[in-house]
Image (cartoon, helix red, strand yellow):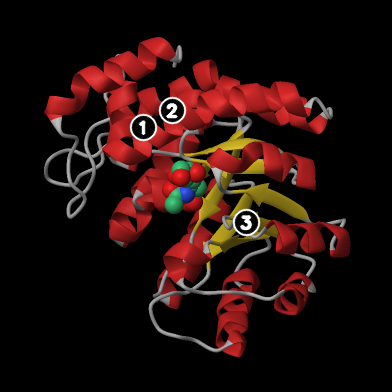
Amino acid sequence: MKDLKGLYSALLIPFDENGEVKEEGLRQVIEHNINVSKIDGLYVNGSSGENFLLNTAQKKQIFKFVKEVVGDRVKLIAQVGSLDLNEAVELAKYATELGYDSLSAVTPFYYPLSFNEIKHYYKTIIDATDNSMILYYIPFLTGVKISLDQFAELLEDEKVIGVKYTAADFYQLERFRKRFPNKLIWSGFDEMLVQAAITGVDGAIGSTYNVNGQRSQEIFRLAKEGKVAEAYELQHEANDVIEKVLELGLYQTLKEILKVKGIDAGTCKKPMKSFDPAKLAEVEKLVKDYNL
Ligand code: NAY
């Protein structure tokens, strides 16, 4: 199996005004990620891909197109989690046949499910293919919390290779690292990359790496080498960018940054709002000031 460690962009997807995927724009976003952001891989159909606003045909279209464009140049993880378990299984099979390096699935959300129901959900997806699985833990959006002992139960299956951990619970992260030294952890909060790297994660998956990949790679490398003060200098810069992006609207503004760079990153899918054109000068300044 490939070494899946490293920094992944949670791939942004360009949409047109009707909510259809702009394939040519997506090609440009992918090339930018590989050639400019210098990421190690792409996390496809995650939150940043607006996945939970898409129908099955669009999810498949994106999985197929991304693989066609990327080939084997960088690693690919397919997020297939869905409230419709049948859809999750279908997507898991589809992405595996396309050659995705691993699957990942968000914890099922909205309905307050028991841990046994969540376990059954993962087992059903995992058993559908011979691919590996990365748990996608993001309690602030799903409302689903998993304890360390519950993680242990999910990780008993050797096909579960690790977790994408999007939470700021550094105590749990430290306990996780100590208890499961052979499992992989990808950090999901770009604004806390230094802290996550010091805690011993194996990589990170984030939306802002689409536009700020090289600086983020450097943060990760420096922190891993114990050069914490230097890493923090760059994290401060990254967080200036993230703060502004969050203020202006996360995915809209990341797409706008790409547009300033000449990439047709399209718009967000409704009901997400589009970027406010009155704020364009602020984005242009951000790109210039932080050399994005
Ligand atoms: C995903 O699946 O796209 C992710 O979860 C990537 C992680 C991002 N989380 C969300 C909810 O977008 O990169 C982070 C996040 O955008 C960043 O840290 C800014 O808060």
Question: Dots 2 and 1: beta carbons under 8 Å?
Answer: yes
Above or below — where is 22 with respect to 292?
below
* Label at residue 165: 3
Q: Amino acid at mark 1?
A: Lys
Q: Which residue is mark 2?
A: 241
- Pick whichever, 211 or 288, lies toward us: 288
Whether residue 280 appears in this view of the structure is: yes
Q: Residue at x 13, y 27 (%)?
A: 277
Of the image marks 3 and 2, the number of the one nearer the N terminus: 3
Q: Nearer the viewer, mark 1 or mark 3?
A: 1
Which quarter of the picture shows residue 103? bottom right
Above or below — where is 181 with respect to 211?
below
* Label at residue 143: none
Q: Amino acid at mark 3?
A: Tyr
Looking at the rendered image, the quarter that the C terminus falls into is top left
Question: How much space separates mark 1 and mark 3, taking CA atoms?
Answer: 23 Å
- Pick whichever, 87 or 136, lies toward us: 136
For label 3, the crowd category at 10 Å Cα-Cα, with few meaning under 14, some 14 to 19 and many 20 or more, is many
Of the image marks 1 and 3, the number of the one nearer the N terminus: 3
Q: Is residue 121 left or right of residue 285?
A: right
Q: Residue at x 20, y 44 (%)?
A: 20
Q: Which residue is mark 1?
A: 244
Question: How much space separates mark 3 and mark 2, taking CA atoms?
Answer: 22 Å
Where residue 88 appears, as percent x and y from the top left, is: 46, 68
| SS for dot 1 | helix
Where residue 107 appears, as percent x and y from the top left, is: 52, 70
Which quarter of the picture shows residue 142? bottom left
Which quarter of the picture shows residue 179? bottom right
Q: Nearer the viewer, mark 3 or mark 2?
A: 2
